[in-house]
Amino acid sequence: MAYRTPPGPPPDATTRGFLGVFRYSRRAMELVWSTNRRLTVALAVLTLLAGILPAAMAWVGALIIDAVIAATKATQDTGIVSMTRVFTLVALEAVIVAAITGAQRGISLCQALLRAQLGQRVNVMILEKARTLELAQFEDSEFYDKLTRARREASSRPLSLVKRTFGLVQNLVSLVSYGVLLVQFSPWAVVVLLLAGLPAFFAETKYSGEAFRLFRWRSPETRMRMYLENVLARDYNVKEVKLFGLGPLLLDRYRDIFHRLYQADRSLAIRRDAWGFVLGLIGTLALYGAYAWIAVAAVVSRITLGQMTMYLMLFRQGQSAVSAILAAIGGMYEDNLYLSTLYEFLETPVAASDAGQVKGPLPDDGIRFEGVSFTYPGASQPALIDVDLHIQPGESLALVGENGSGKTTLIKLLTRLYRPKQGHILLDGMDLNDWQENALRQRIGVIFQDFSRYQFLVGENIGVGDVRHFDDEKRWREAAAKGMADTIVEGLPLGYDTQLGKWFKNGHELSGGQWQKIALSRAFMRAEADILVLDEPTASMDAAAEATIFEHFRKHTQKRIAILISHRFSTVRMASQIVVIENGRIIERGSHEDLMKLDGHYARLFSLQAAGYK
């Protein structure tokens, strides 16, 4: 099954300025510092030691060689002194080697501990940000790509950037110490050392930017692969996958996406490594040219054998340090590019949830929709058009209409999951936009048709209805009784402590109707909520069971505003006010008796459904 790939990666503004993209380095350092200051300081100190000690080892090595040569030429009287000097220098080098090994081990330990803490810190930052976003942002594909990119790469990039930064400092310290010793041979040797690695560095930087553009471009395809994995491997989908024979078809699409992504990766890898090899030869030629230069200087006795050994070691290690420095800068550039996706997501503007009022001026006015219209982002047709509606406290409202008529959209606007494009929604005489978000949400208990089935304990599945009482077993029992789930819980092996779902050991799965009663109980967890909304949560039940539940629901909501959405008119007729919505507009309203006398759309649908039960 072919999967159409979007056009090739467009130019990306983030990659145009090499220096400008490093603006995230400081923020990454601040993030690591705030995560664990002690580990950061320890890492810095160990990095400095690891940078200084190699040059000291090279210097002591040169002294050892010259001391050995001197000892071979010494007389019997001075031989003991010469041998003592050799052994002393060897012991000193052993101490330096042990110190280098200890510093490297310490660096590795600090990085491992920081990696765990920083990965958790960044993931929490991402999830905390996600918690503040609005539903419309999650339903926007471009924004979801932004979230996917942040979660995929950015959680590991801050530490990578810090590791490269400290590595850069370490190699700079080493290079300076090498240069101090190497300049005694010739200043030009230092110049050759610095320039030899530049061509490979520029090539690597170029391809790092190209890799990032490719990463941003293919986020939708990567997300599709993740989705296909979920469809093929999760219990929610396995029944239809097997019954419809979707496995081979979806697996072919999964393979097709991989091959398309692989071709782009393969092309980039070949060009990146080919140019890296060709330009790296320049550094190799410079290294062996310097070898010849130093060897000739030793042959003509301008330097000693010990100095020759030291300079050769310094030049080799110096070239490695230059390569490591340039690689670190290129890697930091790449890390900054990826970190831009993290901060692009974290800096997404959101409305302040704690701003606003906690009560309205007219507590007896209930809910009002005044000229409300709404169109979903990217949609061409409005979901609601010029809706006027008033629901008074203690009144029950039923919303009737075909699928897609706008019933659920009206509920999403009432719960401020979306905001109307035109008109106003008022609660207690105050616009919903002026309410404090938490105060508003505590006023409303709502269960949607596509309610979540949490892989939690039974009690916790009920407790999610009010996080303030998430672990309150007394409230679980009261809510379960009102939601008619208490008899279901009594039949479970561990009662309210029974694990639900099949993802975890000893999990117990419920039927669709049983899950709906658990979900209904959530609405009753909010004892203070005076607005209760049921958006077809009993669709899996038969008509008799649904009528029983709604009768029970009406009994427990006599002093509250109750809003019901159902396709069964035997249930709808219980509401004190019925509103018929068609294509986003209210076309009829009134009690059941009023609408039957009107003999309009509602009466026709009611008669058709009633005839089906005869």
Image (tube, helix red, strand yellow):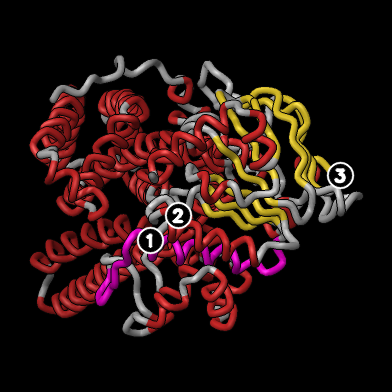
Disc 1: CA contacts within 10 A as few (<14), some (14-19) or many (>=20): some
Residue hosting label 3: 429
Quadrant of residue 196 within the rendered picture: top left
The residue that disc 2 covers is 538
Give the camera-side residue of 299 and 363. Answer: 363
Q: Which element is circle 1 on?
A: helix
Q: Indicate the amino acid at tag 1.
A: Gly
Query: Which residue of the protein is positioned furthest toward the right in this rendering?
Result: 361
**As drawn, is 279 to the left or to the right of 194?**
left
Coordinates of residue 251 in the picture (x, y in percent): 12, 37
**Vertical side of 381 occupied by 536: above or below:** below
Find residue 192 and report its horizontal and vertical position in percent.
29, 29
Q: Earlier in the sequence, mark 3 or mark 1?
A: 3
**Residue at point 63%, 70% (across, down):** 468
Q: Which residue is drawn at the image coordinates 61% and 33% (left, top)?
A: 580
Q: CA distance from mark 2 to mark 3?
A: 32 Å
Q: Quadrant of residue 528?
A: bottom right
Residue 357 among magenta residues = no
Q: Estimate the spatial distance between the alpha carbons at disc 3 and disc 1, rounded to whole Å.
A: 38 Å
x 65%, y 36%: residue: 579
Q: Position of residue 439 (x, y in %)?
A: 74, 57
Of label 1 and label 2, which has the lower sequence position?
A: 1
Disc 1 designates what residue? 513
Range drawn in magenta: 504-529
